[in-house]
Each structure stands twice: as structure tokens, then as C-alpha cells.
Amino acid sequence: MMRVSKDPFVLKDAECVAASAFIPWNELEGKTIFITGSTGLIGSLLVLSIACRNKMYRQNIKVKAMVRRREKAKHLFSNLLEEAWFEIVEGDVTQSLQSAGHSDFIIHAASVTSSKDFVAKPVETIDTAILGTKNVLEYAKKTAAKGFLYLSSLEVYGIPEKMIVSEKDSGYIDCLQVRSSYSEGKRLVECLCCSYAAEYRVPAKIARLCQTFGAGVDYADGRVFAQFARSAIEGTNIVLKTRGETFRNYCYTSDAVAALLLLLVKGRSGEAYNVANRETGISIADLAHLVCEKFSSGKSEVVFDIAKDVGKLGYNPVVKICLDTAKLEALGWKAMVPLTEMFERTIGSMRLHKN
């Protein structure tokens, strides 16, 4: 069988998703899935997982992978370019998608993901969220899609009053902080999804993801998990600009992608679902210590260099939150990859792509 990825860690993850028994694959057989943000960490694993499913079980699930840069997609999906079921759609979600043709299911994964951009480019962050999602919802409406899934974030909870939060909970967000361009944008888009579900019967479901990471992440990625992994690989200290008091749980990419495919078909329209590994709750400081102890061969230490204005760095206020995933688990999903293994696989993959 053709290898859908040259990265053995990514390939293993894609094959794991493809073999997931709780995903209703038969309802996707022969259907077309339109995926935005297809070259991102989650979007690309979605594409590769479906590729593995097609190769392993001949289900002929068609994929339209929407990307902003065709060349990046051609490199990432080089082994899929000759497949009849695979199509690259070049474009920007902030522009009309009416020329994209018919799709049965839509997964909207395109988003600004850099915390620094939330502060440096707040208008673009909001435009991508709101204008982009409206365009994708209009596309879903026009094509009478059977399922629409929006990838949201735990940041919609803001600063909650309790640590363990369900989909019914909410917290405080300061709308006058430009860093809120991301979280407020996500909140409004969730309402937009529910509005399209109510007014136009677009079967829109929402996945509220905790911080999700795994094999295939870009070596230069600026998110905290990648920074920690790089320090372990290079044997340098992990420098924290805060006291690392924020506490949250995490999810591995293959677990998240399996959840997304399940929700795409079985999630209830107009509802949100938390996606996280409830066993991974940990503070940023303790996470840094874990990575140093387990993966740096004793070469890295945690160093605190507290910044005077962390807001300019794009950091959120201190939050202590763990997502309750009972609603998702009731559909048959279960997280499989523990925190230490998440970093083991991520670091293994990043070593392959260093330099």
C-alpha cells in the first residue's frame, strides 16, 4: 500500500484514525468532504487519515482540500496528487466559495492560530473567523451539505468560574483587549453557526478543541508545545516569560481528528462538543518540567524570565480550565494517547524535520 506520508509518525497516526471503529465510515463512503485549512496540523491529518481509509478499505471518500498556497499542498500531499478522489482547491475563505462545486460534508478548520498574530493582526484574525466562516456556511447552504463542522476553541470559555467546564458553561472575556480578537471571534462564529442551523437548516456542529498537538507540526511552530519540544531536541533551556500558572488539558492530533470525523456525522446540529483528553490536565510550568525531565537527556532546565508586559507577547490571562468531554464520549469516542506519549511522538517527528 502506498505510504500517504513520508513521516512514519504521521503515517502511524493517520492509520490509527483510519482504523477507528467508532467513526461512522460507511456514512462517508462515496461522499465528498470539503476541508478548509487543509495544510494545517489538524487539517492535513484529516486529509491523510481519509487517504489511509480509502487505501485500507476502498471506501472512495472524495476530498476537496482547500488551501491558500497550492505549492505547499502539493508538497504536503505529494503522494495523493494522482488519486482520482483527491482535489486541491486553491483559495481564501474570506472570498466567495461558490465556484468550489458540490460537497456532501464540510469541515471548516481554517483559522489564525498564532498568539502573536492575535495581537499584531487582530483585524485579520477577526476577518478570517467571521467573514471566512460566513463564506463557508453560505457554501454549505448552497450545496445542501449533509454535515458541517466548525473547529472552535476552549478560548470561548474565557476565564471560567470553575475549573472543569461543560459545554453549557461560560466565562469572562475582556472585549477591549486586542488579544480577544481570537476568543471573541470564535464566540461570534459559534453563534453564527447556530444561526445558520436555525434559519437555513445548515447541519452545523461545533468542536471546542483544547490545545491539540502531535506529529507533523512545523519545526518552527511558535506554540508552547513546539517551543518546549524544540528545547528538548536542541538541549537548550525552556525559558518561561510567566510563572506558568495556567492549567489546562491537551489532546493528541489523532484523537482529535477521530473525534472530528465522528462529530461531522453524529454530532447534533446547533450544538458544541468539547474535545480534550481529560487525563492530561497540567500547568504550563509543570509541563515544561515534564518535557525537560523526560526528553532532554538532562540538558535542559526550566528558567523563569518574567516579562513586564506579557500581553504584547500574545499570552492569555492566567486560566485554570479542564474540558469535560462526557458529551463527546457518549457518542463512543475515547482519547487514547497519554500526555507523555504525545510529546514522544511529536518530538520524534520534529527530529526528522529539523533543518
Image (cartoon, rainbow, N blue to C red):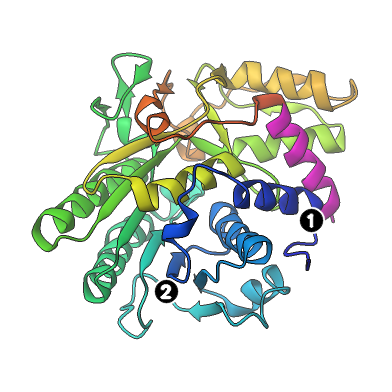
What residue is shown at x 32% (from left), y 36% (from top)? 156
Q: Which residues are magenta?
A: 341-355
Query: Residue 342 bears which disc, if any?
Result: none
**In the image, residue 346 above or below residue 245:** below
Q: Main secondary structure of the magenta part?
A: helix
Label 2 SS? loop
**Residue 348 magenta-highlighted:** yes
Could you tell me the amino acid type at mark 2?
Answer: Asp
Instruction: Locate residue 35, reporting x and y percent.
Output: 46, 65
Counting other residues with Cα less than 10 Å from the Cα at mark 1, is it few (<14), some (14-19), or many (20 or more)? some
Of pointers 2 and 1, the one earlier in the residue sequence = 1
Query: Residue 7 bears which disc, if any?
Result: 1
Task: Please give the residue where the numbered disc 2 appears in the rendered image.
Answer: 92
Instruction: Locate residue 52, reporting x and y percent.
Output: 66, 60
Could you tell me the amino acid type at mark 1?
Answer: Asp
Counting other residues with Cα less than 10 Å from the Cα at mark 2, is it few (<14), some (14-19), or many (20 or more)? some
Q: Nearer the viewer, residue 17 or 243?
A: 17
Instruction: Locate residue 86, reporting x and y percent.
Output: 57, 76
Q: Quadrant of the N terminus?
A: bottom right
- Between disc 2 and disc 1, the foreground one is 1
Q: Is residue 109 left or right of residue 224?
A: left
Q: Nearer the viewer, residue 123 or 68?
A: 68
What residue is shown at x 49% (from left), y 55% (from top)? 25
